[in-house]
Amino acid sequence: MKKYSILAKELLDRQIKNWDWCINGYGSLKTVITHEFIYDGFSLKVQFNPGRMTSTSAKVDPKSIKERKCFLCEASLPAAQERLEYKNGYRILVNPFPIFPEHFTIPKIEHLPQQITGNFGEMLELAKDLDGEFTVFYNGPKCGASAPDHFHFQAGTRKFMTIENDFDSLKKRYSVNDRLVDGVEVTMVDDGIRKMVFLQGTDKMAVEKEFYLIFNRYSTLKHLDEEPLMNILAWTEGEEFRVVVFLREKHRPARYFAEGTERILLSPASVDIGGVGGIPVEDDFNRITQEILTELDRSFCKPVICC
């Protein structure tokens, strides 16, 4: 059998040719404008991407979710959308509203809520099966998931997010705590803007164990009985798993709800905090400066670091 990374690329090639949503969505990437801001040891980008308006402005409150059909369930998928069956009860779908040059949504076939508990090991397995070609990411139900009622991962082209390229320099310059347990290196990173946990190891079960230790400690620190706000990235470098866990304070920054020129329509999720902020309104994009971007990112990444 072909590798899933190859099958996914072939799926995308077909859908770009025969599905109008994909033709339009991936065509719109040619019009995306990007600004890059350089910090000490890392960089952050913002993109003007009008094709992301639906996701950025999505209503994810319980009432709105209850009143709409689940767009990841079989009955709601467009007839033209091909399904690539994956193991463990998942399927791989081309995302027709892309951020990445190659962008996939990987939902569970069964309609189950978005929660990482019990599913993180499958995230690592998916990253391994995608063979280093794609980065897998998870948006929590209250910090970026536009379908908090239906469990899903997403995957996009490797090294598109700046944090993937800055991983080693961030770890070297901004580590505030680190430990090595059962071959897994756990590093707390605070770059002055984001609060992150880096995990590195070749043993999937050991990486999974360390993730759940951090998850439980963070839940306890935040005094929560529900999933704490976090976004997660996972990819492989050779035989090594690399994981970034972003610790969040809130979903959307104050400027998202502001009026007039103070408003910036940025609804940050994994990709945005990973270094590529998507802004669907051109005037908002044109107002972004390094100072404003720093303010925006700091405003929703303020939790106590735990390791």
Image (tube, helix red, strand yellow):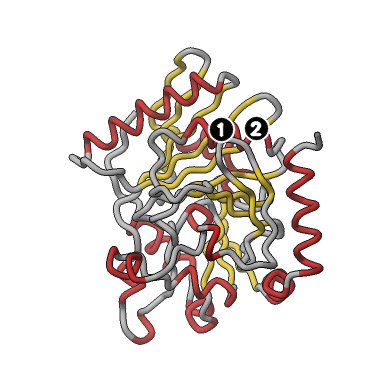
In this rendering, the answer to whether 28 lies above or below 245 is below
Which residue does the image show at 75% across and 63% down from the upper left? 15
- Describe the element under mark 1 as helix, strand or loop: helix
Callout 2 touching callout 1 (CB < 8 Å)? yes
- As measured in the structure, the alpha-carbon distance from the residue carrying label 2 to the one carrying label 1 is 6 Å
Residue 42 is marked as: none
Residue that carries the numbered disc 1 in the rendered image: 124
Outermost residue toward the top in this view: 182
Element class at badge 2: helix
The residue carrying mark 2 is: 128
Label 2 CA crowd tier, 10 Å (few <14, some 14–19, many 20+): many
Please say if 101 is above or below 286. above
Q: Position of residue 306 (x, y in %)?
A: 31, 32
| Residue 18 falls left or right of residue 144 | right
Q: Residue visible at 41% across and 48% down? A: 112
Q: Among all residues in the image, which is located at the extreme front?
A: 75
In the picture, measured across the screen, residue 71 lies left or right of residue 264, that is right
